Amino acid sequence: AVIATVLTCSMAVTPVFAEPDTLESLQEEQENLQNQKEAAQNELNSLQSDLDTIVTKLADLEDQLIAKGEEIIQIKADLEAAEEKRQEQYDAMKLRIKYMYEAGTGSATMEKVMSSGDISSMLTQAEYTQQVHDYDREQLQEYANTVQEIEDLQAKSEQELADLEDLESEYQQQEENLN
């Protein structure tokens, strides 16, 4: 019983000593794990920053897509209004030309001026003829301007559509990067 008591006491009192090499390797392993953790955290922060940048770009591209869509809608409305205006001007010019043909032109106009009687009537008739001629010129120029406006609007519409397609492809590329 004495021997058992002595052995039991010696076991409880005797401390366990670890080898110094084992303690150093545990500290090195702990440092390696800490370095790996810091590297992973840095990579996570970098990826989060990249994600934030891509999300911001996507939001900007989406806003640009919306703005381009609204521009295209406005251009189409302007184009439609210009087409209606062109048709009205064309119809008015056609009617005017028909009237001029029926009423006579050139020598008939000169004949009206000469046969108007006294000089004041002749000057009035000549002034009226000049005003009609000026009005016809203005209407023709306005028609030409309307046709040019339509061509410009069509070109702008095509350019805006091309820009919209470019933005959509960029948006899809950014979305793929995000995924």
Image: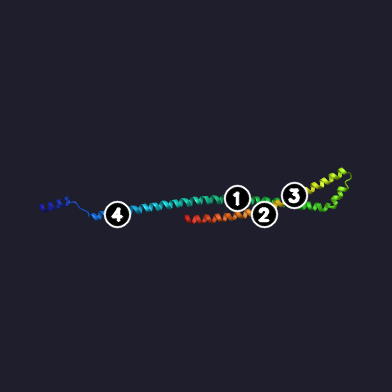
- Residue type at numbered disc 3: Gln
Q: Residues within 10 Å of mark 3 (few under 14, many from 20)?
A: some
Residue marked by disc 1: 71
Tag 2, which secondary structure? helix
Residue marked by disc 3: 139
Residue marked by disc 4: 28
Decide which of tag 4 and tag 1 comes sooner along the chain: 4
- Expressed as whole percent of the image width and height from the top left, the position of residue 127 reads 82, 45
State the separation of the CA atoms marked 2 and 3.
18 Å
Residue marked by disc 2: 151
State the separation of the CA atoms marked 4 and 1.
64 Å
Decide which of tag 1 and tag 2 comes sooner along the chain: 1
State the separation of the CA atoms marked 1 and 2.
17 Å
State the separation of the CA atoms marked 4 and 3.
93 Å
Could you tell me which residue is drawn at 61 percent across and 55 percent down?
Answer: 159
Total of numbered circles in the picture? 4
